[in-house]
Image (spheres, grey):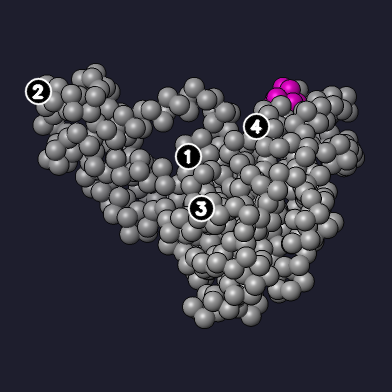
């Protein structure tokens, strides 16, 4: 996400790091490049001007130029200011109200409203332990209602069916039904248009006038460029929104319009979609996103995702196996599957400081994904006995496994070599920790 912006900004940072001493000219040259890269990436020119002017004012000063590492200080200033542009701090959904808390999902047709509605329902159910119900008021497209019903079935969410053809009546009935089944949240998926028109705006206004809505979330497709800014401004001016949800950030190479949305509307980005799966919805943390854009990683989010994907009990069992040198090929396969639960390999690597550039190498990412799939296929073709004891894998067994997994004996040999290296490395890490503890005792 934000690949173009990240790539060009980091290119400017590299030039700064290459200077032993940073002068005012160095800073101005870097800011000029950054300004151009932001404009090329569809960031609103007013946002660019304000951001660059602020950084320039703070960066060109004795405090920065006399610091031990002026390049890093410049990057920190940039990170802080970019975080402010993105919203400064995380903004929660307004759900502490008399149930059911009602969330209105609005946006243009094709922006991802229906999928976002289902993702939000699943997110609230799993992360916030709420009991949401969902309904659709898109009476113009029966397929949209059916789509939401199917998605709710997949996510095991309560879908409220309604055959009424009056939008206000559908909303009223949905609130009543949600209350009766004990739902504390109602998510209403609204109809969209290819472009903003008076009929759509009137429908949305009537819903907000007749039904108590606690959150109005505007869903914006990050890939529509500068138009996203106009859409956000018009919806906010006409309807009034409480927050933004950015979709398709995983496929957006430019991303500049998304950076401008908060500035233009004055409303926070609350959530963002990072993939097509129903579990690919995340809270938008401005400071973390700024770090990711600047190639500084996002370790906090990575740890949170890992803790959600792997239970404490499983992690404990794995640690014990590593300590006792009992780590098997079955455990190796489980570790790969756990990593996949965190998200795409590209997204995961982008969160690790220093590896951001690697995540942008499409060929490397494709090769890594293929290798992971191949590894799982090879281990799946082994018997339980073979997975638990790699020492019995003689030539005959390896040929059988290669045929069963559609790979070669050489692939099997490479996998076993990598596995043994990983076991050795894990064992050495254990020794290192033990030696470090002993050292601390005598220090």
Instruction: Name the image quarter holding the N terminus.
Output: top right
Identify whether 409 is placed above or below 244. Answer: above
Query: Is residue 335 at least partly visible in the picture?
Result: yes
Q: Kindly identify which numbered label has been placed on residue 147.
A: 3
Give percent across and percent down for residue 270: 67, 56
Q: Secondary structure at mark 3?
A: helix
Residue bearing mark 2: 396
Q: Which residues are magenta?
A: 11-18
Q: Which mark is residue 253?
A: 4
Q: Residue at x 35, y 48 (%)?
A: 434
Q: Earlier in the sequence, mark 3 or mark 4?
A: 3
- Picture layout, residue 317 above or below residue 60: below
Left or right side of 421 for 31: right
Residue 112: x and y in percent read 61, 48
The secondary element bearing badge 4 is classed as loop
Q: Is residue 11 above or below residue 158?
A: above
């Amino acid at each position: 996400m934000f690949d173009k912006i990240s790539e060009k900004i980091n290119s400017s940072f590299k030039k700064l790091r290459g200077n032993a001493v940073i002068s005012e000219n160095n800073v101005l040259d870097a800011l000029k490049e950054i300004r151009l890269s932001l404009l090329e990436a569809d960031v609103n020119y007013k946002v660019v001007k304000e951001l660059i002017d602020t950084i320039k004012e703070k960066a060109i000063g004795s405090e920065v130029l006399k610091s031990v590492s002026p390049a890093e200080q410049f990057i920190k200033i940039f990170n802080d200011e970019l975080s402010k542009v993105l919203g400064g701090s995380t903004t929660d959904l307004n759900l502490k109200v008399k149930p059911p808390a009602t969330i209105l999902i609005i946006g243009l047709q094709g922006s991802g409203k229906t999928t976002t509605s289902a993702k939000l329902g699943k997110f609230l159910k799993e992360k916030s332990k709420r009991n949401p119900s969902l309904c659709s008021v898109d009476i113009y497209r029966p397929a949209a209602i059916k789509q939401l019903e199917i998605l709710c079935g997949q996510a095991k969410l309560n879908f409220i069916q309604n055959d009424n053809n009056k939008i206000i009546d559908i909303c009223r009935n949905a609130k009543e039904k949600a209350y009766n089944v004990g739902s504390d949240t109602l998510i209403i998926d609204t109809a969209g248009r290819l472009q903003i028109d008076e009929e759509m705006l009137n429908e949305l206004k009537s819903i907000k006038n007749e039904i108590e809505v606690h959150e109005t979330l505007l869903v914006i497709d990050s890939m529509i460029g500068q138009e996203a800014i106009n859409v956000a401004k018009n919806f906010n001016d006409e309807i009034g929104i409480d927050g933004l949800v950015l979709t398709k950030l995983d496929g957006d190479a430019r991303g500049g319009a998304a950076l401008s949305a908060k500035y233009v509307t004055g409303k926070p980005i609350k959530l963002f979609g990072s993939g097509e799966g129903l579990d690919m919805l995340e809270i938008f943390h401005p400071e973390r996103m700024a770090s990711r854009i600047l190639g500084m990683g996002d370790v906090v989010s990575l740890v949170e995702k890992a803790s959600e994907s792997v239970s404490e009990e499983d992690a404990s069992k794995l640690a014990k196996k590593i300590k006792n040198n009992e780590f098997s090929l079955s455990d190796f396969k489980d570790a790969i599957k756990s990593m996949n639960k965190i998200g795409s390999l590209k997204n995961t690597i982008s969160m690790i400081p220093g590896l951001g550039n690697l995540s942008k190498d499409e060929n490397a990412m494709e090769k890594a994904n293929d290798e992971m799939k191949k590894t799982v296929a090879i281990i799946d073709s082994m018997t339980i006995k073979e997975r638990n004891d790699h020492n019995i894998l003689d030539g005959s067994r390896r040929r059988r496994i290669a045929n069963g997994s559609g790979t070669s004996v050489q692939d099997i040999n490479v996998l076993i070599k990598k596995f043994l290296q990983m076991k050795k490395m894990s064992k050495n890490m254990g020794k290192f920790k033990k030696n470090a503890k002993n050292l601390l005792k005598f220090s």
